[in-house]
Amino acid sequence: MKKNLLLAASALALCATGASADMTFNRIASFATPDNMAEGEDRARETSAEIIAASEDGMTLIYTDSPLGVVGLIDIIDPKAPKALGNIAMPGEPTSVTVRGMTAYVGVNTSEDYVNTSGQLVVVDMAKMEIIGSCDLGGQPDSIAVSKDGSFVSVAIENERDEDLGDGRTGQPPAGFLDMVSVTESGCSDVKTVELTGLTEISPEDPEPEFVDINTLGETVMTLQENNHLVVISKDGEILNHFSAGTVDLTGIDTVDERGALIFSDEQLGRKREPDAVKWIDDDHFAIANEGDMDGGSRGWTIFNKDGSVVYESGASFEHALVQIGHYPDKRSDAKGVEPESIETAVFDGTPYVFVGSERGSAVGVYNVSDLTAPVLEQLLPSGIGPEGYVAIPERNLLISANETDLIEDGGVRAHVMIFERSEGEAMYPTLTSEGADELIGWGAISGMVAGDNGLIYAVNDSFYGYQPTIFTIDPSTKPARITEVLRVTRANGDAAQKLDMEGITLDGEGGFWVASEGRTDRVIPHALYHVDADGEITDEIGLPAELMAVEKRFGFEGITKVGDTLWMAVQREWGDDAKNTVKLVAYNLETEEWGAVSYPKAEPDTGWVGLSEIVAHGDYFYVIERDNQIGAAAVTKKIYRIPAAEMVPAPLGGELPVVSKEEVRDLIPDLKSFGGYVVDKVEGLAITAEGEMFVSTDNDGVDDSSGETFFWSIGSVE
């Protein structure tokens, strides 16, 4: 029987630190790139959204899709309900796109290999959805930009290096250059080539142009990424200035890859910026995203005057802001951290903004640059996985992100275009932050939760951070909720307690905790219960009995709760002796040391699997989260159910178990959709306060093949 048992739902997520209470950006819609495929096409093919642009009226988007060899178009007349307009096939690999009016110019790579390079500038009528002209370029194009008067297009001819040749170093012919293409409504009339060799110190014979933008004076600014260099070129093709992008000294960073811990005590001194994207802020200043590639990547962004002087340097501050909202990609951090790659600039209602996109952190920083020497980070927005390009439409108060990562091969989420709107109201994201704590607290992969006696909530991370098992203290009274403290889980010798997979936590009634470790025996991680004292030390360890281990499978305890002297654990999926679509709720009596269980009937999935991910006792009921492993439009089951406590009478293991009844409390899919993105799969945390308020959280998988988004919200009070 379906019944909504919540009295009132609170706001899902509110203002981010520093965001104006009057005007804020919030995500209002997302568009999956496979939706642009024609009926009958194989949607299992990889697709992507990389560089994106908008028609002059702001009603139509166009993006490059390199894997499919097309450009895709989206109708955003109603930005909250984007509509597929379809794809247009290109004569090669589309690398970049820019728009003037309803005419799009697309850079297309037609090169045979790294030596025999070629390309085209393809002209597309967006209204008619057809190619209306093209011209040959002298090499492999990367970024392109159209002048404000529409008279020419600047094309960065990268002629990229073969990263498998010569240790991936620069110095590989043919050299790149800049093409300045005079354009008409139907094509190209003239191509002017600007040579760039001999300018840089690193590889003067191999400039490696990366990104271009044009100001209102017709001046083109260009990054030579691997050469760590910047060039400013007049509308007539004269090099006005060129200079090194310079270096930055970084401290308080994490540089050790695959460590499974967030420890920000490292440094990188003299780190080359190696900028990727560049955008003019005004006719004299531009911003760069310091992604890095060969030797650099300073994890932040910089404002330059075109005379070569640095006006502002973010240092590690942008990365630290992403750390605080759980978007730090530990497993991929090693050299370049959050890897800023994208830059967009625009003026909204008289306020100039710089938008800095983090490729690996899957987020965008919204900076107010009214004072170019002291930009203010107003918001951080969740952009989708692997943001590659942004376009601002200030006339419509819109910001768009194009996210290139498609996880179809891993059964994950597809590439998306995300739409954000600037409007009155509070910011929905982030929903959880560690900003304001006494130390820089990195976090992610939140799984089990429990409400404390003092209005606080305690949460654990799972085995993603195997070298840093942690209990987090969360203050849910603030908006966003705040992680205020961390308690590291240790062994008696004080070392981090490795080989844990903490998926559940409950109070022990004495100031400490009981933790359930899901376990995975093929990785020598035991299924077990751990008693953790108030100092974080494990004081007791309880392994599973032979009756359970005889039927053990990989998917173990997901959640733990305590009633009197009894611990109750939810097993995620069927073990060897469970009937199809049933799982055990396992009991362990701390006084008698007896084990028992009841059987729980879960939903039968059409696709994938359904399992339990949390259990909480409150009042006359036990509450569980039941979820499938599906993402986006495929998601069906993300629900809270309750079980009468009177039915939770454990029977001995090994025999027939009583089957409990369940009643639906809340379907969480509408909640997840309200954040404006796709529905995430891992709803894993549930906490119920003494007053009966229910908090839910999601697991962001440590930003590994994930958007990094963590949703923590209140769904109101139980009856």
Image (cartoon, rainbow, N blue to C red):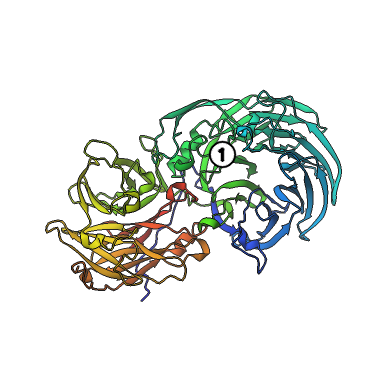
Residue 633: percent from the left, percent from the top?
Answer: 52, 64
Q: Residue furthest left?
A: 592
Residue beneath the point at 85% across and 52% down:
186
Q: Could you tell me if residue 223 is visible in this image?
A: yes
In the image: residue 633, left or right of residue 512: right
Q: Residue furthest bottom?
A: 1
Residue 102: percent from the left, percent from the top?
Answer: 77, 54
Residue 115: percent from the left, percent from the top?
Answer: 74, 39
In the image: residue 713, left or right of residue 236: left
Residue at mark 1: 340
Above or below — where is 290 with respect to 83? Answer: above
Residue 611: percent from the left, percent from the top?
Answer: 37, 64
Above or below — where is 640 with respect to 66? Answer: below
Residue beneath the point at 23% across and 41% down:
537
Instruction: Quadrant for residue 240, please give it.
Output: top right
Q: Could you tell me if residue 234 is visible in this image?
A: no
Instruction: Quadrant for residue 349, please give it.
Output: top right
